[in-house]
Image (tube, grey):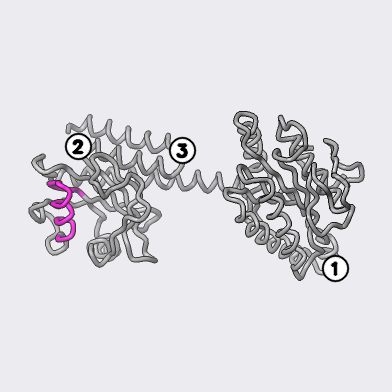
């Protein structure tokens, strides 16, 4: 490959990773771009998991063998099978060496290769009908992160030293792309995460609830919302300090997350202040109510606070047509206000019998007595 073509290949690889949405797309773009750039038939991207002493494969692209999935769940290689991982990616480099790529073939080490460390890779090449491979260490944030592996089939020209040098360049481009992907994912995570509890925040709920209601309107998918207010937070803050109040919020967040796990795919969130919610898309309304009951029970057992006021609204219950996220939220919110007014120790469910037996018939607006301070946390759902 000429210099111009190689420069084009580097640019294409970088652009492919930059356009990726999420880690998986970035991994695939990295492996596929390197495979094309080096004229390979197969490529893999792997991460070095030091805590497990293994090299774990993230993605396989190109002509895969029967035992190679594109995104394998558990394809990994113990370090003791490939001692060059630790010796080359850590010890040699830490001692002042450069993390350069190397070539191995199905016949043994290539010219300028690394004798003594190739038997497992040689066996893998032969088993999968490949003639040679180039292995390029990936270094991220000053540490060995993993490796880029590109192979050619048996009978194809064996990788040369120049290919290994080019693979070293490609690995550097891949490292930069991975770093960018990690930064973007961290930024996205922070944008949709409550800093104190680690739960989703109101922005995440807004987006997910809008999508869920659209899905409900399209195919009737059941959408349920549990809105709860943590009782006694102000008293804890006033008498024991905000640090203790924060601990109560964190502990209740853990309880909410635990109860949310009863509902596959449920989103547990802190809307703000002392207000939390669970959003379930798909589970039956009865299952959501049961999870809400368990939430009330566990919240009452916390050593701090005074339990929780909990309201539930589900499209599967007789609450009328739900054409907007705002309507479902207001019904759940109103049920929660009723639970608070009644000092209920279990959830009030819109459209069902409430804690005081009559059917809970809730308007589309929160109770008039709702404190203005708490209304601020409703966002655009008010």
**Which label is found at residue 326?**
none
Counting the numbered discs, the total is 3
- Locate the C terminus and report the quarter of the image it occupies: top right
Q: Quadrant of residue 196?
A: bottom right
Cα–Cα span, label 1 and label 2: 70 Å
Look at the image and say whether residue 130 sits in the magenta stretch. yes
Give the answer, above or below, for where 51 lies relative to 293. below
- Locate the N terminus and report the quarter of the image it occupies: top left
Q: Earlier in the sequence, mark 3 or mark 2?
A: 3
Comparing 77 with 178, the one in front is 77
Q: Quadrant of residue 330?
A: top right
Label 2 element class: loop
Look at the image and say whether residue 70 sits in the magenta stretch. no
Counting other residues with Cα less than 10 Å from the Cα at mark 3, is it few (<14), some (14-19), or many (20 or more)?
Answer: few
Residue 88: x, y in percent? 24, 61
In the image, the segment drawn in magenta is: 119-134
Quick check: marks 3 and 1 in contact, CB under 8 Å?
no
Q: Determine whether, in the image, residue 248 is placed left or right of residue 19.
A: right
Cα–Cα span, label 3 and label 2: 26 Å
Per the image, the residue denoted by label 2 is: 39
Counting other residues with Cα less than 10 Å from the Cα at mark 1, is it few (<14), some (14-19), or many (20 or more)?
Answer: few
Per the image, the residue denoted by label 3 is: 21
Q: Determine whether, in the image, residue 157 is placed left or right of residue 190.
A: left
Per the image, the residue denoted by label 1 is: 239
Quick check: marks 1 and 2 in contact, CB under 8 Å?
no
Give the answer, above or below, for where 210 lies relative to 136. above
Residue 62: x, y in percent? 26, 39
Give the answer, above or below, for where 250 lies relative to 326. below
């Amino acid at each position: 490959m000429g210099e111009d073509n190689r420069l084009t290949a580097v640019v294409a690889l970088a652009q492919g990773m930059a356009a990726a949405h999420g880690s998986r797309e970035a991994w695939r773009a990295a492996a596929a771009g390197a495979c094309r750039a080096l004229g390979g038939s197969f490529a893999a991207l792997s991460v070095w998991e030091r805590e497990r002493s293994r090299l774990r494969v993230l993605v396989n692209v190109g002509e895969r063998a029967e035992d190679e999935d594109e995104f394998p769940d558990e394809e990994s290689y113990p370090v003791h099978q490939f001692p060059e991982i630790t010796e080359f990616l850590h010890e040699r480099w830490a001692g002042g060496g450069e993390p350069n790529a190397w070539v191995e073939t199905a016949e043994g080490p290539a010219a300028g290769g690394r004798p003594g460390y190739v038997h497992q890779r040689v066996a893998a090449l032969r088993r999968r009908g490949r003639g040679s491979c180039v292995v390029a260490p990936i270094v991220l944030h000053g540490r060995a992160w993993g490796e880029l592996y590109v192979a050619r089939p048996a009978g194809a020209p064996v990788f040369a030293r120049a290919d290994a040098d080019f693979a070293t360049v490609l690995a550097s481009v891949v490292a930069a792309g991975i770093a960018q992907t990690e930064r973007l994912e961290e930024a996205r995570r922070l944008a949709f995460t409550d800093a104190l509890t680690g739960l989703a925040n109101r922005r995440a709920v807004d987006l997910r609830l809008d999508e869920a209601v659209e899905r409900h309107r399209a195919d009737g998918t059941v959408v349920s919302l549990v809105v709860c207010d943590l009782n006694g937070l102000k008293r804890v803050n006033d008498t024991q300090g905000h640090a203790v109040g924060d601990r109560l919020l964190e502990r209740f967040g853990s309880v909410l997350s635990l109860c949310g796990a009863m509902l596959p795919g449920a989103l547990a969130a802190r809307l703000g202040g002392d207000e939390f919610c669970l959003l379930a898309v798909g589970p039956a309304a009865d299952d959501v109510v049961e999870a809400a009951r368990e939430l009330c029970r566990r919240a009452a057992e916390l050593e701090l606070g005074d339990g929780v006021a909990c309201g539930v609204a589900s499209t599967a219950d007789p609450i009328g047509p739900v054409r907007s996220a705002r309507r479902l939220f207001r019904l759940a919110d109103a049920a929660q206000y009723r639970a608070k007014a009644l000092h209920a120790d279990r959830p009030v469910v819109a459209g069902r019998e409430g804690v005081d037996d009559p059917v809970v018939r809730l308007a589309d607006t929160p109770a008039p007595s709702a404190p203005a301070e708490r209304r601020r946390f409703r966002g655009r759902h008010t």
